[in-house]
Amino acid sequence: MTLYTSAESNIRKTWLYLTLFLLFIIGIGWLISYYANSSVILWIAVLYSVSVSFLSYWYSDKIVLSLVRAKPVEKRDNPELYRIVENLCITAGLPLPKIYIMEESQPNAFATGRDPKRGVVVVTRGLLERLEKVELEGVIAHELSHIGNRDALLQTAVVVLVGVVVTMVDIFSRVRWFGGGSRSDRGNPIIALIGLLIIILAPFAAQLIKLAISRKREFLADASGALLTRYPEGLARALEKISGSGIPMRIANDSTAHLFIVSPFRGKINWLHRLFLTHPPLEERVRALRQMSV
């Protein structure tokens, strides 16, 4: 399967994950209702999680730009970068996003913005200095694909779902261990065991589903970006250069790492950290891109 066909496959799998996520939440909600003998507490938890998550989403671009200390760049400051972004936006049928630069030596980039009209592309100084034009075009096309595919919206939906799971599990644990409902499972060890497993495993499972969706979106952005430039090798070479750079990023942290085209963390990664990586293995991404040229 090439990236031309895997793009559609990744979209289907993403929505499958979201459907499973929703069914997962419904299952937890049923257990809470069973123990509390009331659905009111469930609705309170859902409304709280959705409200907090969407407020974060509404201001997410401003928060992220502040965290990474990115500064806006005008066309007169870097006309070549602007020409690349403008040409790709015309090809993709997207409005021109705002462009920001991070004063970081590590080559990297990311996109944010809740919809295409409010898109933002951020590149590091190291990316501009170390990549050739065709490689830079591949990276920009990847980030514009995130904007065009409304990945920020999808990721926010996933964050909402994770927040709902965590809040619901917290409520379930309180109802389960401290009472609060008319139901009792003391005579049913199977239900008691199921309740205990949900308390322990639900947040972990929710996080894994979130990461699975994030990884699929990276594959999809690679596919869309390669189709946009019609030169998959440019993005493949860029990914190799970015990941091969041993330069650390000063502001790298877990809250923003998932945004970048390649994880900003450098050095050896243990198996537990690897399990929670938001990006697919680089070798798989490069291999899939180069299959397009065969």
Image (tube, grey):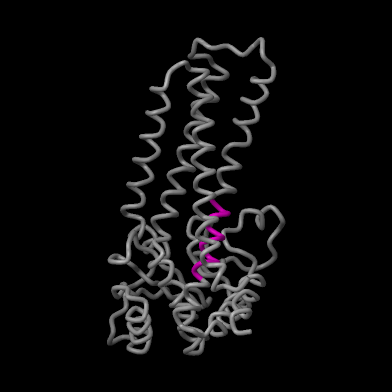
Q: Is residue 75 left or right of residue 12?
A: left
**Magenta segment, prevailing SS (helix, strand or loop):** helix
Q: Residue furthest right?
A: 271
Question: Where residue 114 sits: x, y (%)?
Answer: 34, 59
Magenta stretch holds residue 218: yes
Position in image of residue 204 (x %, y %): 60, 42
Question: At x 32% / y 82%, what residue is drawn?
Answer: 86
Residue drawn at the location 62% of the way across and 54% of the way down: 276
- 212 over 110 or under it: above or below: above
Q: Which residues are magenta?
A: 210-221
Figure check: 114 above or below 123: above
Left or right position of 219 against 152: right
Question: Considering depth in this image, is 99 or 189 the residue closer to the camera?
Answer: 189
- Where residue 106 appears, x then y in whole percent? 53, 76
Residue at 56% from the left image edge and 70% from the top image edge: 5
Depth order, front residue of 269/2: 2
Q: Quadrant of residue 89?
A: bottom left
